Image (cartoon, grey):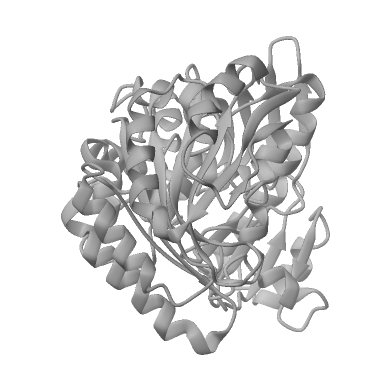
Amino acid sequence: MAARTLPGLAAELSKTFGGHLLQLADTGYDQARQVHNGMIDKRPALIAQCRGAADIADAVKAARELELEVAVRGGGHNVAGLSAIEGGLLIDLSLMQGIHVDPQPRTARAQGGLTWGLFNRETQLHNLATTGGVISTTGIGGLTLGGGIGWLMGKHALALDNLLSVELVLADGGVVRASEHEHPDLFWAVRGGGGNFGVAASLEYRLHPVGPAITGGLIAYPFEAAWDVLRFYRDLTASLPDEFTVFGGLVHAPDGSGTKLAAIVLCHCGPLSDGERAVEPIKGFGTPAMDAIGPMPYCAVNAMLDGGFPRGALNYWKSQFLSGLSDDAIRTMIDCFAACPTPMGALLLEHFHGAVSRIGQTDTAFPHREEGFNLLVLAEWLEAKDNEACIAWARDSYAATRPFMGTNRYVNYLADDERGDPVVAAYGPNYRRLQQIKAKYDPDNFFRMNHNITPAA
């Protein structure tokens, strides 16, 4: 068969393709290529906006025929920009937002382009939920396959721990269902292995009773109180019930004033009476500048930080698990944040405890099961003229806090300019097994536009 050109293949595909095929000159192309992080400016040769697994399979086969690199986008929140591609084929799942909730067995199957806000809207009709993203505009697929930190993880573990099955389009265009009983090796690998093994056309989750109202919100204190607030936060998180997930850190006021604050953000997913008792020590601590803790719908909890992460803002993040939240670590965080040049920057502490820490290190590909804190150095700003200063602050802050860090890395937060081999650190003792499964299902490393796991030789 004679080699086909991109326009010719796109024309052939369009005869059966259920979604949209967009090339550079097409209306809607510029909007379709954009991702959440405004730092990313890539132009794919072809965007395949899929409507189902058959479209994804056709896109994979087309990329193979034309020898194009492939990136996959669900919600487009990957901060490193790996859900975009320069000159290759972008498999865009944003049209795939179907979901079916079955309230009796408490399960939901959702297409890979759904966001957590839409997922929760449907499951909360039945007062059900599963651990989802901290930001409601995040896509379910990327967050789940890489881990799935969220407000319910103390009680119900990570998003990936609630997966029952995944419908996956493989590197050869074939479609398989991975679960504990079907392709169990692949099911193990996708629970933490990211997009290395295929495109998640749909994901089936276990749901849990949550709501209709739970206790959540944010309390913030003047930056001058940060030393006391972060030590209080450390003591508080030493003995939390599973239902109580509490994050802390140093942030800026949401009004754009640049006012620096020390904050505690929380979700108690149990009965309101239990939540009220759990937050009493927090509401009674110090003299807060603002207190927005109280009963609210779970959907509101999941969206309460959305305003701080607008689409198109420029982002550069650095992240690593701490070996411990010592006094010296707290002092260093305060010193670093004092120098933050952007009124959208933050240093965040994500606390792991409860159900997420009771799963074995090798039970899934995600190995980080110890109780403790993940530190996220989050630089976010709006003007390109501030790129150099904001990126330098993130790097400097990360370097300053390195003495207090362990070896573990959260793959969903990895930047695209990491030195060394952060992917190995992200998977630890599971990396070799992941390489072997990669060699079985994607020996040519077709899916490599990700935090890549190289196939075993």
Which residue appears farthest toward the bottom when viewing the image?
A: 385
Which residue appears farthest toward the left when viewing the image?
A: 403
Q: As drawn, is 296 to the left or to the right of 227?
A: right
Q: As drawn, is 44 to the left or to the right of 30?
A: left
Residue 333: which quarter of the image? Answer: bottom left
Rendered location of residue 403, percent (x, y): 16, 56
Rendered location of residue 361, percent (x, y): 28, 27
Q: Residue at x 76, y 27 (%)?
A: 124
Residue 319: which quarter of the image? Answer: bottom left
Height in image: 199 above or below 35?
Answer: above
User: Which quadrant holds the N terminus?
Assistant: bottom right
Q: Residue at x 41, y 23 (%)?
A: 240
Residue 416: which quarter of the image? Answer: bottom left
Is residue 317 visible to us here? yes
Q: As drawn, is 429 to the left or to the right of 22?
A: left
In the depicted view, which residue is nearer to us: 255 or 50?
255
Which residue appears farthest toward the top when viewing the image?
A: 104
Q: Residue at x 38, y 58 (%)?
A: 414
Height in image: 413 above or below 357?
Answer: below
Report how many numbered discs are placed on residues in the image: 0
In the depicted view, which residue is nearer to us: 23 or 225?
225
Is residue 440 visible to us here? no
In the depicted view, which residue is nearer to us: 142 or 93?
142
Rendered location of residue 428, percent (x, y): 23, 41
Height in image: 129 above or below 405?
Answer: above
Rendered location of residue 84, percent (x, y): 56, 67
